[in-house]
Amino acid sequence: MAEYNVKSMHAEEFINDGEIRETIEYAEKNKHNAALIDEILEKARPKKDGNGLHCVGLSHREAAVLLACDIPEKNEAMLKLAEEIKLAFYGNRIVMFAPLYLSNYCINGCVYCPYHLKNKHIARKKLTQEEVRREVIALQDMGQ
């Protein structure tokens, strides 16, 4: 098994069974650690700098602790902080994202997706640069 490396571009290095299990164990052990939870929430809070507001982000272990937390007051604090972060990034507006599929070729075997590699019953298509351009324009026009 490859050594865990969060910055790697190779799945076998950043998706690591041992690291996942240790993270779950760490989160379970710390889900009632109010001081640690407060520290993580403070780290996540948007900070002002010369370019406006920015967030430093959380590690996967920090996020796991917050996800495991079942202290009602801390969960309420998380909700308020999430709203603060949303307002810092997007203001008082709703932002929607639309996927743009460039092809339906796939090397995976996900059973929930019709594009998976083993599905031999669909026609495969890869968009040309011109087709991508038209799709992007169509998405832009829909968002106006």
Image (cartoon, rainbow, N blue to C red):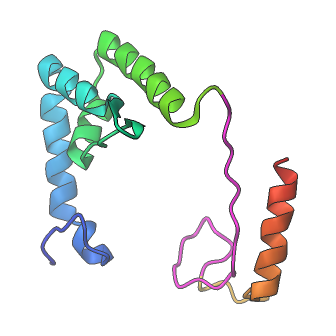
Indicate the position of residue 38 as horizontal and vertical percent values.
21, 20
Of 92 and 3, nearer the camera is 92
Please identify the quarter of the rendering in which residue 29 is found: top left
Q: Which quadrant of the rendered structure holds the N terminus?
A: bottom left
Extent of the magenta region: 93-116
Q: Residue at x 27, y 26 (%)?
A: 41
Q: Is residue 102 magenta?
A: yes
Q: Is residue 83 shown left or right of residue 24?
A: right
Q: Main secondary structure of the magenta part?
A: loop
Of 71 and 114, nearer the camera is 71
Indicate the position of residue 99 as horizontal and vertical percent values.
68, 61
Of 41 and 16, nearer the camera is 41
Q: Is residue 125 magenta?
A: no
In the image, residue 117 above or below residue 37: below
Of 99 and 119, nearer the camera is 99
Q: Residue at x 53, y 85 (%)?
A: 107
Count of numbered marks? 0
Indicate the position of residue 48 as horizontal and vertical percent values.
34, 30
